[in-house]
Amino acid sequence: MSMLNIPVEVKLESYFGQVNNSIPTKFVGGESACEGLSYQYELNREDILFNTQSFGIDFSTTINYKLNLNYCLKCTDLINDNGNCVVPRIFGSCGNNEPLRKADISLSSTIDFEPNYKLKSKTNLKKLTLIDPCKITLLNYDITSILDKEIRKEAKEIESEIDKQISSIDIKSTCKHLWNEIQNEIPIGSYGYLNLSPNAISLSKLSFEKNNLFFNVGVELYPSLKTEKSTINLKSLPNLTNYKSKDGFEMNVDLDLSYDSITSWVGKEINRTNFIIQNRKIIIDSVKFIGADGSRILIGLNFYGFRKGKLFLSAQPVLDPEKQVLRLVNVQFDLKTKDLLMKTANWLLDDQISRKIEEKSIFDINHYLNKAKQEISKALNQELENGIYLLGEIEKIHLNELYPLKKALFIRSTLFGKLKLKIG
């Protein structure tokens, strides 16, 4: 089992535009009474400014307002049920027939995930500043406190609308796209197809920076590298599990080293090599690594000179994971070849050939591993679908075990790297 930790970035510009367009730009209200204070107000907001913080989002705007009010000292209902002011009303206003008055408000939203992939937020008014409050005094009524109360009341509507818009941000579809895409096999050049086999998914805490939203998708994987494409039955997006923080990913894969490659390497070192065996000269014409039986590799060797013919040997491949070196040891004549030589050319059983093959069969496979890293990393960088990009890098390959199979030498390895998903 491996853990894949994928950073996801969501641009918030379009969301900010939706918030700005969904909140009314004009608010009107007031209170009317026969006796006492009556007032009507009109609030007009400017565009909302957005600023992301590590915990969430700050919102700020300027309110332009005007206020009409009147005061009745005494009211009677003798004439009609609605009542009449029995003394002349006292009238006052601000923002009428003069520049509108201004107030600055700022709000803040803290945001987190719910278990169903939805975002939940709590938006609160942080600060209200009356820049040029109305200086009207009607008896003992504090007009400033009335304005403060009414603006705060309208700010509640803004808070509610912001929370509504935040909850509408579709994170689940993003996770579903990701979940489905990483179930598809990824072509890895000549190495075959990478099957990530996701099993569980989790989401980290949210963070915000430069008007972008960031979170990590943690995916539990059982990855494998296959030589042939297979049929994938997509699994539905599961419920969220607890998030496990881990930087990057690791997965076990089998890298195959073809016997043709080994033949080429050894051939450069041993072909045309001369041997003097019991005063008889033979020359190795060519060497070929034919295959393996699960433990030993079969080697075919053509020679000429004093005699001409073909020999078959076998060797034990040994892997040094730390030095990243592959060597062949315990090179021996094949049993059938040995039996034949004992009857026809016993002198060829000299171990010079075996020692020479062992001496020249030491391979530094760093070049092969670097090539594999580059090819796999390249395959992990692609556009999965419109606007969703997979960005990956293999940083290290650790060699674990060696399996000499019939068609190739398989090296079971652990790949360490980073994988990222970018949206937009």
Image: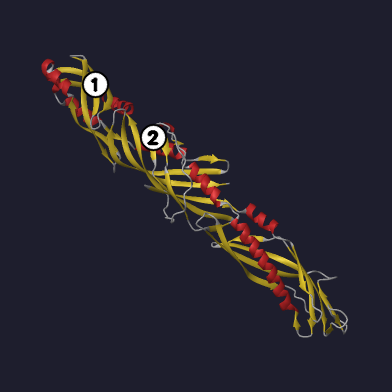
Q: Earlier in the sequence, mark 1 or mark 2?
A: 2
Find residue 130 and report its image quarter: bottom right
Residue 149 x, y percent position in the rendering:
70, 74
Q: Residue at x 66, y 57 (%)?
A: 19
Residue at image x 44%, y 47%?
A: 418
Find disc 1 in the rendering and name its residue. 301
Q: Is residue 164 left or right of residue 102?
A: left
43, above or below 19, in the image:
below
Q: Quadrant of residue 403?
A: top left
User: Which residue corresponds to the image point at 54% horizontal and 50% vertical from the top-left?
Assistant: 172
Q: Residues within 10 Å of mark 2 (few under 14, many from 20)?
A: some
Rendered view: 86 above or below 116:
below
Amino acid type of the residue tagged 1 in the rendering: Leu
Residue 228 percent coordinates (x, y) = 40, 31
- In this view of the protein, which residue sits in the foreground, 315 or 105? 105
Residue 191 versus residue 121 in the image, above or below: above
Judge by depth and name the residue closer to the eye, 26 or 400.
26
* Circle 2: residue type: Lys
- On the image, numbered disc 2 is attached to which residue? 226
Secondary structure of the residue carrying tag 1 is strand
